[in-house]
Image (cartoon, rainbow, N blue to C red):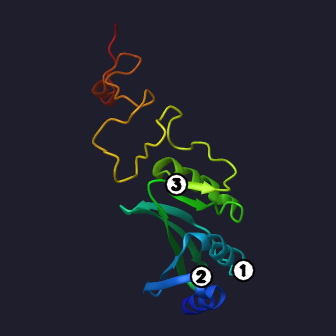
Amino acid sequence: MTESSVIDEIKERLGPKVIRIDQPLPDRAFIYVEPEDVLEVVRVLFEDMKGRFATATGLDSRDYIEVLYHFPFDKQDIVVTVKTRAAKPFPEIDSISLIIPAAQWIEREMHDLLGIEFRGHPDMRRLILADDWPEGVYPLRRDYSQRREPPGPGRVKPVSESDSGESAEEKEKGEVSES
């Protein structure tokens, strides 16, 4: 099977579920699907066609959140990315973690950082953000100002001196003050 046969098989198996396919390079393809078709498309790529799930990514595209699922087909030397959109301000999409349990962590990460709600996910506890991070504040959304200090008491403060009383410069030089 070649990279073009992977695309042909996707067209054959998924037909009308695929809005369009872009292939900017021979080894890269993007499949655009509606959010309600993500589970079926992922199931076909992963279970039927034996694509390897590498990761998923999320992107705030101003009016919606884009969710991308990346599937390398190693023997055919092509990476197929499934792209869909979730509406803002409360993006929701079905979790793929019942098909691919390894997707649980990346879905939790996208939930923390972009506010995507993954329906059917077995464990949506926070993964990245501190427990005291305020609800509804998503640091990878375009409306979050990265020039301000992170909210909440759990933020990390710069340390000018270590517990031993050494300054950062002394520590770097290996000098220790004797008191």
Position above or below: 142 against 33:
above
Position above or below: 171 against 142:
above
Q: CA distance from mark 1 to mark 2?
A: 16 Å
Q: Earlier in the sequence, mark 1 or mark 2?
A: 2
Q: Earlier in the sequence, mark 3 or mark 2?
A: 2
- The residue sitting at 66% across, 74% down in the picture is 40
Q: Nearer the viewer, residue 108 or 15?
A: 15
Report how many numbered discs are placed on residues in the image.
3
Q: Which mark is residue 116?
A: 3
Q: Amino acid at mark 2?
A: Lys
**Quadrant in the rendering for residue 172:** top left
- Residue 51 position in % (x across, y down): 64, 76
Viewer-nearest of discs 1 and 2: 2
Check disc 2 and report its element: helix, strand or loop: helix
Where's the N terminus, which quadrant? bottom right
Q: Which residue is mark 2?
A: 17
Pick out the residue farthest to the top.
179
Check disc 1 and report its element: helix, strand or loop: helix
- The residue sitting at 31% across, 45% down in the picture is 145
- Residue 115 position in % (x across, y down): 49, 50
Left or right: where does residue 169 sit relative to residue 35?
Answer: left
Q: Which residue is mark 1?
A: 48
